[in-house]
Amino acid sequence: GLDWTEVARFERMQARFEHPVVAPLIDFALSKADVHRMVEAAGLPKQRLYEMGFPHANCGGGCVKMGQTGFAHLLRVWPARFEMWEREETALRDFLNRDVSILRDRRGGTTTPLTLAQLRERVEREPMLIPQHDWGSSRPGPRC
């Protein structure tokens, strides 16, 4: 699934993995819209995660590289999947006994951990205050 916008990522993967890494889309300067049109023209169904409004179809709708916008979207369209991510993050925090989180809160000029539980509470309390463009590395362009 790596495309022409991810050459650097592809090269890092080639250096890191012992087995051959191939990415046929690297050689074609196709936009995501181009690929979607090709899929539609071939009569293939649109991938479910795109139908759900995700910018990519990687990672089953969640990703450790996803930002606040992405996880807020996951909470809205697939609450059970969000709950799984929240539960796993909580289990990791308990296991490590550390204040770690997938997300970061960068308000007020400082960066602090923002747990998925805290994000869920914010979405429930103040949905309009959730960033609208923080898809993280899962946004179009460099992806997870």
Image: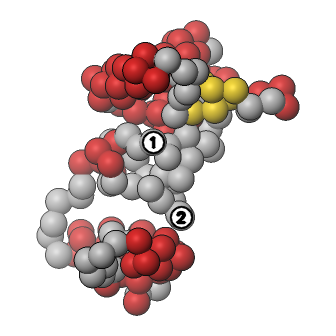
Q: In which quarter of the image is the N terminus?
A: bottom left
SS of the residue at dot 2? loop
65, above or below 100, in the image: below
97 or 72, nearer to the observer: 97
73 or 142, nearer to the observer: 142
Q: Can residue 3 be seen in this view?
A: no
Report x, y in % for residue 82.
36, 27
The residue indicated by pointer 2 is 141
| View extreme (bottom): residue | 27
Q: Earlier in the sequence, mark 1 or mark 2?
A: 1
SS of the residue at dot 1? loop
33 or 129, nearer to the observer: 129
Q: Which residue is drawn at 33% across and 54% down?
A: 57
Report x, y in % for residue 93.
46, 21
28 or 96, nearer to the observer: 96
Q: Which residue is drawn at 49% across and 18% down?
A: 97
Picture quadrant of residue 28:
bottom left
The numbered disc on residue 136 is none
Please name the amino acid that badge 2 sits on. Gly
